[in-house]
Amino acid sequence: MNDKGAIEMNDYEREHKEILRRFGAECAVLLKSDGAFPLDAPCALALYGNGARRTIKGGTGSGEVNSRYFVTVEDGLATAGFRITTKAWMDRYEKIYAQSKKRFIRELKRSALRRGTLAILDSMGAVMPEPEYALPLDAPGDAAVYVLSRISGEGSDRKPVPGDILLTGTEKRNILELNEKYKNFLLVLNVGGVVDLSPVTEVRNILLLSQLGVETGSILADILLGKTTPSGKLTTTWAAWEDYPRIGEFGDKNDTRYKEGVYVGYRWFDTVGKEPLFPFGFGLSYTSFTLVPGKAKAENGNISLDVSVKNAGSLSGKEVVQLYVSAPPGRLDKPFQSLAAFEKTNELAPGEEQTLTLSFALRDLASYDPDRAAWILEGGDYVLRLGTSSWDTKAEAVLRLDGEALVRKVRNCLGRPDFADWQPAARPSETLSDVPVRKIHAADIQTETVDYALSREVDPRIGILSDEELCLLNIGTFKQKGSKTVIGNATDAVAGAAGETVCLREKGIPSLVMADGPAGLRLSRQYTRDEKGVHAIGSGMPESVMELMPAPAALAMKLFGGNGKAKGEILEQNCTAIPIGTALAQSWNLDFARRCGDIVGDEMERFGVHLWLAPALNIHRDIRCGRNFEYFSEDPLISGRFAAAITRGVQKHPGRGTTVKHFAANNQETNRYSSNSQVSERAMREIYLRGFEIAVKESQPHALMTSYNLLNGIHTCERRDLIEDVLRADFGYQGIVMTDWIIGAMYSGKSKYSAPDAAKTAAAGNDLTMPGGPGDYKALRKGLRKGTVTRRQLRINAARIVRMAAKLTEK
């Protein structure tokens, strides 16, 4: 661990880590259990695996958080009283890993050199597959734990190769040998995404620990000893690699076609009847539960179902109850079922009961009809299914709609792909008997029509600004030589911050400071301050980026940092790494998500950050996406509700806001700056935009970030239809919109599509081009002269920035 600083922790750090430790087990998913765990007491433990000592708290890139300490599995178990018998094995593994990593980085740099580029640009986020090795498993122990780790991150996608999505020969051999050798053996998955476990399904006990931030090792120790009970549920489908559909495309440098349409994740598995290894929503417990549903109720367009949950086992625990709905197939094809509501119990003692109410708005079951540009409920039977995973649901009620209902009239905005969405040949058939039916009248459902004539007020302060000042307000602040770094140390206000808006003090317009995420604030841990501002000690760049830099440059950054050599008193800003997005969602506990937002909001207040560049809520479309660990789920309801809960936690702190991202269809890292996502209007609205809509309507995040990728041939940051029509008019969004961090060097390679233009971005209603630079400023001035963007639009954008700056900086 790097817990030597625990004694000198600040009170806020202790409070935050205690929250994570108390709730962390709710993120862990027990995939298999034979009752061998929890253990009665600490014992002699044979600890193996690449994650035993090299435990991973989160992914690479913007998600790396510079915390004071981090508890590894080895240290967490030792602190809990376990006698680790495999230190020699871990020492030998460390040498193997270090040699393999050195060769891997060397080859990345050589490969980039052959292509005439830099590894830091060409291979950002690249992950070394786990090496093969032969070390004996001969240590004694009363129990054994094998910790399997995987890491991924911003800039690179995962691959279905041994050591990444697939298990290596070494891992399969070691895991199966330990499972045979030890009566008490637990396979622990310290991963951020799916690993194909099909070769080791005979293992009796499997725990998806995930990556839980600074307290990861301590949380596992508590689970092993039964101090806490794992109560997480999967938010993405775990299957054998060969069982995932190959309908849609993934990873093409130029165009990726989302041919699967709305059949993403469990929507495909459940519709075609393909049973995965572990289905969406699945998770066991140390105890067991019984569910007794009541009668479905319909009132004022809202549907509810009461469910009595009883702990039928001998240990305490929590259960998640899930309600799915099967919509009737009609002119529009439909998935077999979709998640409509969920609730989690309190901690229930053996024999204790609790009644949960699961509810949703009937309107939310509507499907999008692109031919009519409308959300509709087709007539027929809507079957309510109750269960504890998508593969284990039972019909409890039928809502019989007596005709079609037009729910919301919009307009098609998002362009057309060059294909038609895949449709299933048929859905699983069933005969429902003894299921109560409740009649619903279509005439009772009112039609909403979206008004696209937005009112755009201009702040009085904007009227006195020159063209030059308006252009400056439409981009992030920069110095004449450009921003200090791509990732950190971008302002003089907060060490390690990612960016800042322009400050025009003489016009009464303050700046807003932004920090990266999404697993906590990513700031420089140590810094100095003088009359010129703050100066970070160190580069401010993540270690995963530093190791790809040319050796002389990396050495200079480490020695002198991004702002010169450290002088004066060394100050600290220690941030808390919270669970990664996927792990947080696996808790199915919105209150815990809100508490994590509260942790971040508190630290934002302490360190002077206005906007957190998180949460990220893109869909787990494909398990190969390198940033899936940042995102919540393959399901938009989970994604939107968790983003909203985190936002509420952050924004309860005055002057602090979230920046939900990446808007939208950002589902691969391969050529992420210039890849074109081809997606149908229906799939965009039902799957890829739905989570953003929920987050906006439930929490009104203060900021939103567009994505790097293009959508149907146009950069998302340049799509006025996406930003003004869908986001602002349709969803009712009231905050500011910014680009992702657009750096010219990112677009130096050959690509079918050109880089986005700051003038077109501003014309689309995207308020800020970030992080800002001389090239963006020149593009805006040129666009203003040529009419690409109007002064009126610059004033509208600037007005939104000014209002948000006033809101977040008022005393």
Image (cartoon, grey):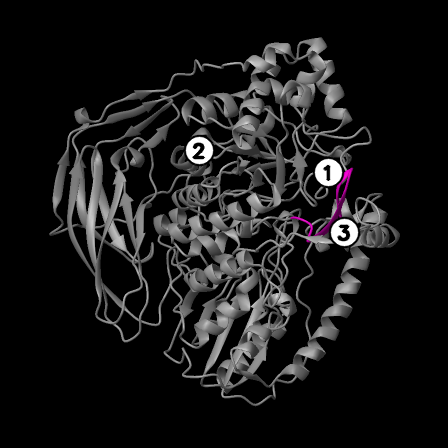
Q: Which residue is mark 2?
A: 700
Q: Which residue is mark 3?
A: 537
- Please name the amino acid that badge 1 sits on: Asp
Please name whichever residue, 681 or 660, is drawn nearer the observer in this view of the structure: 660
Q: Position of residue 405 (x, y in %)?
A: 24, 26
Rendered-image quadrant of the N terminus = bottom right
Looking at the image, residue 793 lies above or below residue 754: above
Question: For the residue carrying disc 1, how many other residues have a C-alpha within 10 Å: few (<14), some (14-19), or many (20+)?
Answer: some
Q: Quadrant of residue 424?
A: top left
Q: Choose the circle earlier in sequence order: 1 or 2.
A: 1
User: Which residue is located at x 78 percent, y 53 percent?
Assistant: 548
Q: Nearer the viewer, mark 1 or mark 2?
A: 1
Question: For the residue carrying disc 3, how many other residues have a C-alpha within 10 Å: few (<14), some (14-19), or many (20+)?
Answer: many
Q: Between marks 3 and 1, how big is the CA–CA gap?
A: 13 Å
User: Which residue is located at x 45 percent, y 34 percent?
Assistant: 689
Q: Position of residue 553 (x, y in %)?
A: 85, 50
Q: Which residue is mark 1?
A: 492
Q: Secondary structure at mark 2?
A: loop
Give the extent of the magenta segment: 523-538
